[in-house]
Amino acid sequence: MLWLSGCGSSAAPKQPAMAPTPSQASASARGAPPNESDENRFYSPVAGLSIEKRPNWAFVTLEMELANREAVSVGKQETDAVMHDGTTPPLVAISRYQEPSEKPNPSLKITLRALLELTGASAVEIARSVTETLKQAIPSFQLDSEIRAAQVDGLAAGTFHAHFTVDVPRLQRSFPVTTQAWIVPRGKYAFIIAASDPSGGTENYEADFQAMVATIKIRK
């Protein structure tokens, strides 16, 4: 299982621009609760999670998310096959620029994954297992910090910073990606929040990522 899939890129083939709304951000989550239906807020009534994007960021449609995934490679065939599989889309994907974008596109994505044998483990233990999986799945994956405890909406989380490289065969280019992830276990599942910057951190989107994560609300 690839926990951090489909990182932000400008790799998607050109398609007509769409006007995504919070309800279009994912095929698996629709609707909004009372008083949370503004255009900058996404809410999944099934997952019990909401997030507010920055006003100058955009929700990514499922179609563009899958097109971006299919256009990139992490340098391992088995991992690429999982990443290109459209059966496990994120709950929501948010990008700095409207897709399709001419430039590398930072993104924040939230997925919901079954914990399976990790059910009952601490958030830090789960984050450690995630990084071990990523080291095997992505040849260039390297941790940039210690895995540590954190909180998201008052809930225990495990977090880490890392970097890796994605290739865009169509453009014959590679992009250095810096990423921070927060793993929030909830019973038999975990929310995986991944903020990825394909500028390699040179454009410094950290404040935007932190601001959006701070708006996350998770049903208790």
Image (spheres, rainbow, N blue to C red):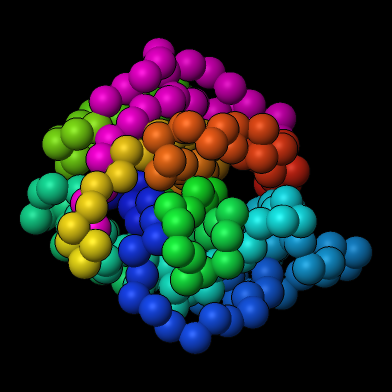
Q: Is residue 19 above or below residue 25?
A: below
Residue 183 in sight: no
Please name whichever residue, 163 or 30, is drawn nearer the observer in this view of the structure: 163
Residue 143 in sight: yes
Residue numbers of the magenta segment: 142-168
**Count of residue discs:** 0
Q: Is residue 65 above or below residue 94?
A: below
Res. 121 image quadrant? top left
Q: Is residue 13 above or below residue 176?
A: below
Left or right side of 205 for 85 = left
> Among all residues in the image, which is located at the extreme right?
35
Q: Is residue 22 magenta?
A: no
Quarter placement of the C terminus? top right
Q: Position of residue 140 (x, y in %)?
A: 19, 34
> Among all residues in the image, which is located at the extreme bottom?
16
Left or right side of 213 for 195 = left
Q: Residue at x 28, y 35 (%)?
A: 164
Q: Main secondary structure of the magenta part?
A: strand
Q: Position of residue 162 (x, y in %)?
A: 37, 28
Left or right side of 141 for 196 = right
Q: Residue at x 71, y 38 (%)?
A: 211
Q: Residue at x 53, y 18 (%)?
A: 149
> Among all residues in the image, which is located at the extreme left?
77
Q: Is residue 154 magenta?
A: yes
Please name whichever residue, 6 or 155, is drawn nearer the observer in this view of the structure: 6
